[in-house]
Image: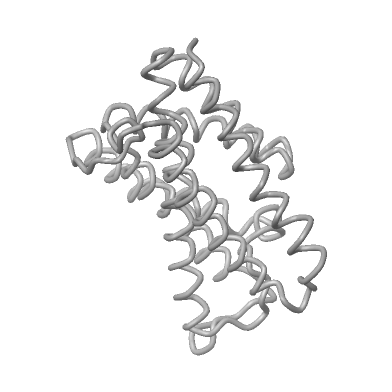
Amino acid sequence: MNTKTLLLLLVVAMIYLAWLLLHQVIFHRSFCRPANRVAEYFYHRLSGFLFLGIISYWIGSHWLDLSPAQMGVGFTLNNVAKWSLLAAVLVIPALMFRVGPQKRNLWDNPKIRARHWSWALVLFSTLSWIIYLFAYEFFFRGFLLFPCIDQWGLVWAVVINVVFYSLAHLDQGWRMVIGAAIFSVILSLISFYTGNFYAAFLIHVINACCNEWISLYYHPEMRVKGLI
């Protein structure tokens, strides 16, 4: 185990905790109120893009001397990516139509708890998910995963990824932690076999957007103007 890899794990923990602290302690408690939940979630996603995407990439390239390829940046679309995306397009919407109407899901989704949604809000929420998840998947399936593969091999890299990713969902209950662990294994393996984090990013976008749209459709207290 070399110093650079240990430093990477420390940096990953520090970046995530700094982002979490800024949101939970400073922004959420000081500025956000229930009536302003829309602004809070947009802030959460955009600040995530800053911390998990821009700052982590800068630290990786300037402080840790990692090349873009070593952080899973380098677009390729091989057969694994194609089949994975096809499976995601077919399976995730079907799964969400089954899970979406359940009370347990509607208790937390959609994350933005606005009673009346305009089409502009739907659009901006979707765009914010895309921006946020690009950075989020780079952070976990690029910045964290690929250097760990180089140092410890695939199995231990996936284990480390599962641990960090599960801890990131610890505040959402044990069901979410288990789901996050399984999701982490799947996305980590897809990233390894595709050589980058882009397929994982697209799959995560499909999952998040389908969940939001379907939950919004079934939520008894929320409406999209002109649709339902």
Q: Position of residue 124 (x, y in %)?
A: 48, 74
* Total numbered badges shown on the rendered structure: 0
- Residue sitting farthest toward the top: 1
Q: Is residue 185 above or below residue 133?
A: above
**Horizontal arrangement in the rendering, residue 137 relative to residue 175 (left or right):** left
- Residue sitting farthest toward the bottom: 226
Residue at x 17%, y 36% (from the top left corner): 78
**Horizontal arrangement in the rendering, residue 165 relative to residue 17 (left or right):** left
Decide which of 80, 57 is in the foreground and name it. 57
**Horizontal arrangement in the rendering, residue 105 relative to residue 79 (left or right):** right
Q: Is residue 208 above or below residue 177?
A: below
Q: Is residue 26 above or below residue 85?
A: below
Residue at x 55%, y 71% (from the top left corner): 217
Q: Position of residue 198 (x, y in %)?
A: 32, 44
Q: Position of residue 207 (x, y in %)?
A: 46, 51
Q: Where is residue 59 in the image (x, y as percent from the top left)?
A: 47, 41
Q: In this view, does 145 lie above or below 30?
A: above
Residue at x 19%, y 41% (from the top left corner): 77
- Quarter of the figure with the C terminus: bottom right
Decide which of 212, 185 is in the foreground and name it. 185
- The image quadrant of residue 38 is bottom right
Decide which of 21, 41 is in the foreground and name it. 21
**Horizontal arrangement in the rendering, residue 101 relative to residue 207 (left or right):** right
Indicate how the structure is coloured in the image.
one colour
